[in-house]
Amino acid sequence: MDNDEITRVRRLSQSYAYTSIQMHEAVARKAGLSGTDHKYLGFLMQQGQMTAGELANLTGLTTGAVTGLIDRFEKKKLVTRKFAEDDRRKVIIEPNTKNIMALLVPLYKEFRSKSEKLLASFSGKELKIIESYFLKATEIMNETTDKLNKK
């Protein structure tokens, strides 16, 4: 691959990332959330219940900022706080999947349908290449994030 091809793909990747941010911001606004709150809610959906400290570590937010985040989610009935059975000082944040899905699924319905049709238009071999790219790119981003977050 020559430098022009690499530059072209890098620009497309950047455009995809920027457009993704814009779309998720629009979805978040329709859902009554900020863009970052929307994405942090996604962390909770993906990871499942966790402590506020675990959420702070995952997001890079301070524990104070996580408390505000959880307060906002709780107010919208998107999460509940529960005391850990083994240590009542520990609070577990549990996503309310039913409420989250009711809020977000309608906003993603058309996007999901079109995305699935797009993916179905690729061959199995092409999908393996796309999958490989995303797995490796995600690994590089995680490595970069970890390196930047180290003190």
Image (tube, grey):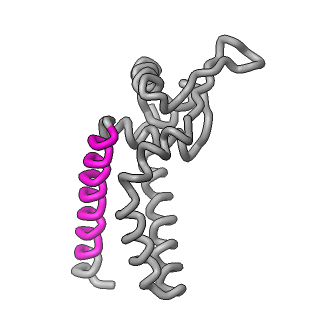
The residue sitting at the right extreme is 86
Residue 72 horizontal/vertical position (percent) = 40, 24
Residue that appears at 62% across and 25% down: 92
Residue 139 horizontal/vertical position (percent) = 50, 58
Front one among 39 and 29: 29
The part of the image, by quadrant, that contains residue 88 is top right
Residue that appears at 44% across and 52% down: 105
Residue that appears at 43% across and 37% down: 149
Q: Is residue 66 left or right of residue 34?
A: right
Q: Is residue 104 left or right of residue 47?
A: left
The answer to whether residue 147 of the structure is visible from this angle is: no
Q: Is residue 99 left or right of residue 84?
A: left
The answer to whether residue 73 of the structure is visible from this angle is: yes
Q: Is residue 21 left or right of residue 62?
A: left
- In this picture, is 19 found above or below 38? below
User: What is the magenta segment's predominant secondary structure?
Assistant: helix
Front one among 98 and 28: 98
Residue 53 horizontal/vertical position (percent) = 55, 25
- In this picture, is 82 found above or below 36? above
* 86 drawn magenta: no
- The N terminus sits in image quarter: bottom left
* 9 drawn magenta: yes
Identify the magenta region. 7-31
